Image (tube, rainbow, N blue to C red):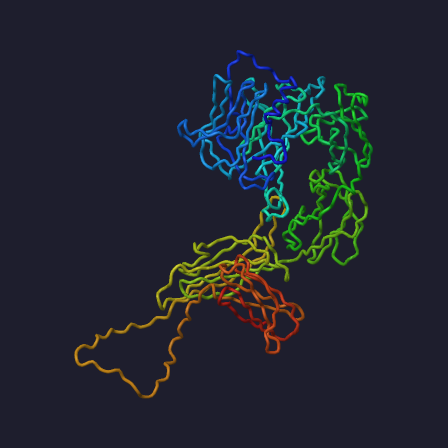
């Protein structure tokens, strides 16, 4: 991956500059010549885009460690080719006494290749190879950021507490948008990577103009990727200002870079406290420790000024969590030395803060397990509650008080009851719902004694269950479709479990669904309805008696959900009959032999036209195409609304529906909707003609040939 906004590893000049510092260990003259390829360890490399550039083909980096002052060359060949196929990647770079060298490979071809690094001292050449490396533009790519001022690091001075680690902060980008990037550092002494830790990826979106975002060029598409920041524990590394640390970042592919530590360790210059939630009787927050550049410092010890007690150590974001009593003052300090006491002359930094009150940190929400409409038989203690959250949306703990009152809507509210949150931040409310109707739950803020204008209204009544049609008829071997509706008045009850049973009469073999079972289960949808079919598996012989049976639907005990105490039964039932009619019996006739011999007769022409044959048994209509059939039913009440129900094939789910009504001989649009996944749409239209009948027409836009039907409603 390329680094247009950061330094590109350690080039020859930069490496030479590091050598001048005298911090690297010089090689012995008689030391053997060595070279190791540190990158592409998993046999993969990627040119996939990330947020750093808008180029469509990105370079990736090869990094090696070689003997001091050796000349290094990177090269490649098609996998398995002979040695004459090696081609050089970039320009050979000389190494400093630190021994690390990197090169970016621009324009790398996609495919499988062998990679090689070679080192020579003028008389001897050694190589290290990575065979069968897959180069693609699909695998996630990752890139370390080589900060010009060096990697920030902090060495803990807390020997008495056993905390003396050195932490270096590493950042970078990746083509991934979530998950983690694995970070580690390489030790030349044992030739292995150490201190692995995971850095979380945060999604980043870059919108750029033309090449490299320059104005005046055609716009480029957005590039999606992620950034990461993590902390390496350098335990075992010889830490010194400016020392070179070979760092590896891995996410699908790797990026290995020799990164120099900053010229000085981070010094504590500031501490701040922010509050962000509620926990039981306290306010939660976090302290943040930064250096003079405003960068977070990991591993810093934070203490309370009142008694020097330990709060904790800062994480990779420079923060440590804390809890403080509500509406109180406290001081904290970041400790810069081994002594636990506060000594500003030794670099300790302090901050004083005042925590907020509960009211400014919490919110109260009503909890209605059964929804805003439910049957009184479904109600049980725990179905009504108040839930208290902190400002981050997390449930608070026990011990907070909230005033509430529950009463019939429109009645005079009673004096508030003071509820106390349990360990889950919930106040369970017991209600006497002996009379069906609308109820109001009013409540106030945490810590107050009066309810305010905040409330929730719900309807608790007696549900009814209906099946339509009440008497279903189909040809023998056919199917009858029933629609069930569970509601309180005109308010549907959704998500309720329904038990279904079918009782055939005599020797009938019909049953529920394609399996012709005698029992089944269903659940009401958002509109309170469900659909069930009774099917006859085979047509009876002509002239056979009709097969009949009874379909029964009963509300069942709805089980608990993950976050609800709802486990109720509306205790409602409904029945409908089914009748499958065989074709009429027709007496057989003796077949007549065909006439043979004689001269062929001309067709009869002329004469008067004959009237069509009438009478006899009616013939069944042709079976319609289910995608061109629409069922429209309706009901209405005086001075209220007309309710229209449209049923079509589920294959038409999502199709637009236009409902029109006949007004003075003209069709006027009344409502518009879309068919749901079950092939059903329920529309409510305000009835404006009181006791008069209204004729409606529905049109389902199902393609080139829209389907229509009409119904008249009182």
Relative image position of residue 400 (x, y in whole percent):
76, 40
Q: Is residue 381 above or below residue 262?
A: below
Quarter of the image holding residue 637? bottom right
Q: Quadrant of the C terminus?
A: bottom right
Seen from the viewer's position, the closer of residues 482 and 37 is: 37
Q: Is residue 3 above or below residue 646?
A: above
Q: Quadrant of the N terminus?
A: top right
Q: Residue furthest bottom?
A: 607
- Residue 303 placement, left or right of 177: right
Seen from the viewer's position, the closer of residues 40 and 14 is: 14
Q: Is residue 280 above or below residue 434?
A: above
Relative image position of residue 12 (x, y in whole percent):
59, 25
Relative image position of residue 533 (x, y in whole percent):
48, 59
- Residue lying at 75% horizontally and 20% vertically, measured from the top left: 337
Relative image position of residue 31 (x, y in whole percent):
53, 13
- Residue 138 placement, left or right of 443: left
Seen from the viewer's position, the closer of residues 102 and 649 is: 102
- Residue lying at 65% horizontally and 26% vertically, measured from the top left: 168
Q: Residue furthest left?
A: 597
Quarter of the image holding residue 539? bottom left
């Amino acid at each position: 991956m390329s680094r247009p906004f950061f330094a590109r590893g350690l080039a020859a000049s930069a490496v030479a500059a590091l050598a001048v510092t005298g911090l690297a260990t010089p090689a012995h003259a008689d030391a053997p010549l060595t070279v190791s390829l540190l990158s592409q360890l998993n046999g993969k490399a990627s040119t996939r885009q990330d947020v750093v550039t808008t180029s469509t083909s990105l370079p990736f980096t090869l990094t090696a460690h070689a003997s001091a002052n050796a000349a290094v060359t990177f090269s490649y060949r098609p996998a398995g080719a002979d040695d004459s196929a090696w081609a050089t990647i970039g320009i050979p770079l000389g190494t400093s006494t630190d021994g690390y060298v990197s090169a970016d490979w621009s324009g790398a071809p996609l495919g499988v290749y062998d990679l090689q690094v070679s080192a020579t001292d003028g008389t001897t050449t050694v190589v290290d190879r990575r065979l069968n490396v897959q180069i693609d533009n699909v695998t996630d790519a990752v890139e370390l950021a080589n900060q010009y001022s060096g990697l920030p690091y902090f060495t803990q001075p807390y020997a008495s507490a056993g905390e003396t680690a050195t932490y270096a902060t590493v950042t970078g980008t990746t083509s991934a948008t979530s998950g983690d990037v694995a970070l580690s550092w390489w030790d030349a002494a044992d030739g292995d990577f150490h201190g692995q830790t995971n850095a979380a990826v945060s999604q980043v979106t870059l919108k750029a103009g033309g090449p490299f975002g320059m104005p005046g060029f055609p716009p480029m598409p957005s590039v999606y990727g992620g950034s990461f920041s993590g902390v390496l524990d350098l335990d075992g590394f010889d830490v010194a200002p400016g020392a070179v640390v070979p760092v590896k970042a891995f996410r699908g592919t790797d990026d290995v870079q020799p990164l120099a530590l900053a010229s000085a360790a981070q010094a504590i210059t500031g501490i701040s406290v922010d509050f962000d939630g509620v926990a039981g009787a306290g306010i939660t927050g976090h302290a943040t420790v930064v250096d003079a550049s405003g960068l977070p410092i990991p591993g810093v010890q934070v203490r309370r000024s009142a008694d020097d007690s330990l709060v904790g150590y800062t994480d990779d974001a420079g923060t440590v969590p804390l809890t403080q009593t509500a509406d109180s003052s406290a001081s904290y300090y970041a400790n810069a030395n081994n002594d636990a006491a506060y000594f500003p002359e030794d670099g300790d930094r302090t901050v004083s803060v005042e925590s907020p009150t509960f009211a400014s940190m919490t919110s109260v929400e009503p909890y209605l397990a059964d929804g805003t409409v439910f049957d009184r038989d479904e109600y049980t203690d725990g179905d009504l509650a108040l839930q208290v959250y902190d400002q981050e949306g997390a449930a608070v703990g026990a011990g907070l008080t909230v005033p509430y009152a529950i009463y019939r809507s429109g009645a005079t509210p009673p004096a508030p009851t003071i509820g106390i949150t349990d360990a889950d931040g919930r106040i369970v409310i017991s209600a006497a719902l002996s009379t069906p109707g609308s109820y109001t739950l009013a409540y106030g803020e945490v810590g107050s004694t009066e309810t305010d204008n905040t409330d929730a209204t719900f309807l608790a009544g007696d549900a009814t269950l209906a099946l339509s049609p009440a008497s279903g008829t189909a040809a023998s071997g056919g199917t009858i479709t029933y629609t069930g509706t569970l509601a309180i008045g005109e308010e549907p009850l959704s998500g309720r479990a329904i038990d279904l049973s079918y009782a055939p009469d005599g020797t009938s073999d019909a049953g529920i669904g394609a399996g012709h079972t005698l029992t089944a289960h269903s659940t009401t949808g958002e509109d309170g309805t469900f659909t069930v079919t009774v099917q006859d598996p085979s047509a009876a012989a002509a002239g056979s008696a009709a097969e009949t049976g009874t379909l029964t639907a009963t509300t069942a005990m709805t089980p608990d959900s993950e976050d609800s105490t709802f486990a109720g039964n509306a205790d409602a039932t409904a029945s409908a009959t089914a009748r499958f009619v065989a074709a009429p019996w027709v007496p057989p006739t003796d077949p007549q032999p065909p006439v043979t011999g004689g001269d062929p007769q001309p067709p009869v022409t002329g004469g008067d036209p004959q009237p069509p044959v009438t009478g006899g048994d009616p013939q069944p209509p042709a079976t319609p195409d289910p995608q061109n059939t629409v069922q429209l039913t309706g009901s209405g009440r005086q001075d209220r609304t007309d309710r229209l129900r449209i049923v079509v094939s589920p294959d038409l789910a999502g199709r637009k529906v236009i409902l029109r009504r006949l007004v003075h001989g003209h069709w006027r649009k009344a409502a518009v909707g879309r068919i749901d996944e079950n092939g059903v749409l329920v529309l409510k239209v305000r009835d404006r003609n009181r006791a008069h009948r209204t004729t409606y027409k529905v049109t389902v836009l199902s393609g080139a040939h829209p389907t229509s039907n009409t119904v008249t409603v009182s």
